[in-house]
Image: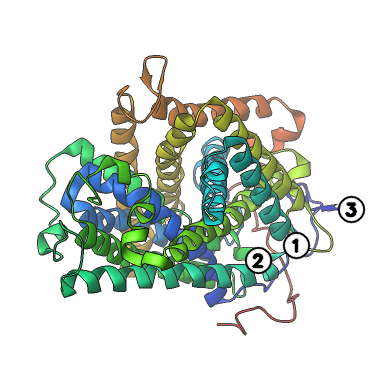
Amino acid sequence: MSQQSTRSASGEGTSDGKGLATGSLGLVGSVVIGLASTAPVYSLAATVGFVVLAVGAQAPIAIVLAFIPMFLTAYAYRELNEAVPDCGTSFTWSTKAFGPWVGWMSGWGVIVAGTIVLANLAQIGSKYFWLLIGNPDLYNSTPLVTATGVLFIAAMTFVSVRGLEIGEILQNILLGIQYLALILFVVFALGSVFAGTAPEGSMVPQADWFNPFAFDSLPGFTEAILLCLFIYWGWDTCLALNEETKDPEHIPGRAALLSTVILVITYVAVAVAAMAYAGLGEAGLGLANDKNAEDVFFALKDALFGPWAWLLVIAVMVSAISSTQTTILPTARGTLSMATYRALPERFGRVHPRFRTPAFSTIVMSIVASVFYVGMTIISDAFLSDTILSLGLAIAFYYAITSFACVWYFRRELFTSARNFTTKGLFPLLGGVMLTAAFVQSAIDMLDPDYGYTVLFGIGGVFVIGIGSLLVGAVVMVVWFFFPAAKPFFRGESLNRETPVLVPEGETRIPRSVDGGRM
C-alpha cells in the first residue's frame, strides 16, 4: 500500500498539514460521531446494573453527578481546540502546557483506553450477533465469538481507512437504530408502569432518586461515578477529527458540548425507566439482582418487548459495532499526531495518499487491540471483564491532565475577562480536580482483592490492569527516549508552546459532507 509521510515537525511538512482530508464533517456529523463513540445502548446495558448495585436508588443522580466533570472537561477541550485544533488533542495540548513527558503519558492514556474498550466492544458485538441467530451453542462458543469479534474489528478498520465520508453515513444509520430502541424502551417501560401492567416490584419514579445527599457509602459512590465516567467517555472523538472538520476551531468544541448534554438526558431517562419498570428488588427482574447487572437490556428484553425483543438485541449489537469504528478513529489520529511530532516512530505518521486517513496507525491500532482481545479471552472471561472495570482509570487520567493543561496553557489570559476566567480557568480546574479525586479514590478501592473478578499478586486484578497499563506506558516512553529519532521531541524542539499548529492549510475540501453544508 503506497503511503506518504508528513513530518513538518522537522521542517519537512507539506502544505496540507498532516495530510488528512479537510472539510469532511459539519456540526451534525460531528455530534453523530461524538454520540456514536460512547456506544449509548451498549454503555447502558453494561453499566446501569452495576451502578444500581453500587448506590441503589441513587443511580440517576450518580449519572447526573458524573456528567458534571465531563461537561466541565468538555469546556477545556473546546477552549484548547479553538487555540490548537490538532488531532493529537490531549497529547498535543498537554505537551504544549506541561512539556513532553506529561504530554506523552496523556497520549498513552488515550491509547490504553482505546485498546481496552475495543476488545470489550468486539466481544459484546460478537455475542449479540450470535444471540440474534438464536442458537445457544453458537452464543456460548468462545472460539467462535472471539473469531467473530476479530472480524468485526477488521471490518471497522477497513471502513476507517476508507475515510470519514463512508464512516459518517454508517454512523448516521447505526446511531438512528440505537436511539429508536432507546426511545421505545423508555416509552414502553414508563407506559407499562403508569398503566399498572409492569411486573411485580415496579414503582413510580421517585424524586428521591435525584437526592445528592442520600448516598450512604463513599466506596459505592466513587465506584458509581467511575462507572458513569465510562458511559460518557467517547464524546471527545469529535475533537480528534478536528482537522477533518469544517471550521475546525469551532465546530468540534460545539459538538463536544452538545454531545455531553444529549448523553446525560438519554442516560437519565433510560435509567429511570429501567428502575421504574424492573424495581430495585434482589430477585427476578429487580435491578439489585446481581444476575441482571452485566446486561440490563438482556434481562428485561423479553418481559418488556415480548416478540419484538430482537430489536434490543440488534440495538446492543449495533451499538458495540459502531463504537468499534469510532474508537479506532481518535486513537489512530492520536498516534498520527504523536509520530508527526516525533513522539512515536515516523511510520505512525503516514497518511494514505488516496483516502487521506492515518492508514498505518489505524491498522496497527486494530492489530494491537485484536491481540489484546484474543489474549484476554484465552486467559479468562473474568480477566476480560476486569479490563472494562479498569477503563475508568485511564479515562480519568488523561481527561484530568487535559483539564489542568487548559488552565496552565491559558494562565496569562484567565483574568482578562469573566468569560476567560470561567471557561478557560474555573470550569476546567473543577473538572480536573473532580477527575483526579475519582482516579485516586478508585485506585485505592481497587486494591481490595474483592474488587472485580480476579486477584493478581494478592491485590485486585482491576487495580493491576488499570495502574499496570499506565506504568507500561511509562516504560515504553523511557525506552523511546533513548532512540535518536525521539530526541527532538524530548528536547522540546519538535513540539512546544510556540510550535505552529500543524493542521491542513488552504481551502482544500471534499465536494460535500454527508450532513450538508457548513454549519
Q: In the picture shown, does residue 227 fall above or below 101?
A: below
Residue, far right = 2
**In-front residue for pair 450/138:** 138
Real-space Cα separation, disc 2 to disc 3, in angstroms: 22 Å
Q: Are marks 2 and 1 in contact (CB under 8 Å)?
A: yes
Quarter assignment of residue 346: top right
Quarter assignment of residue 60: bottom left
Real-space Cα separation, disc 1 to disc 3, in angstroms: 14 Å
Amino acid under label 1? Answer: Arg
Instruction: Evaluate whether residue 337 shows in this view.
Output: yes
Of tags 2 and 3, the one toward the viewer is 2
- Label 2, on which residue? 167
- Label 1, on which residue? 162
Q: In the picture shown, does residue 300 fall above or below 115?
A: below
Which residue is rendered at x = 67% and y = 74% of the image?
A: 23
Which residue is rendered at x = 72% and y = 68% of the image?
A: 505
Q: Earlier in the sequence, mark 2 or mark 3?
A: 3
Q: Earlier in the sequence, mark 2 or mark 1?
A: 1
- Label 3, on which residue? 2
Amino acid under label 2? Answer: Gly
In the displayed structure, does residue 49 sit left or right of residue 519? left
Which residue is rendered at x = 46% and y = 71% of the image?
A: 254
Instruction: Evaluate whether residue 491 shows in this view.
Output: no
User: Looking at the picture, how far across and down is residue 358, in whole percent?
Assistant: 73, 54
Q: Earlier in the sequence, mark 1 or mark 3?
A: 3
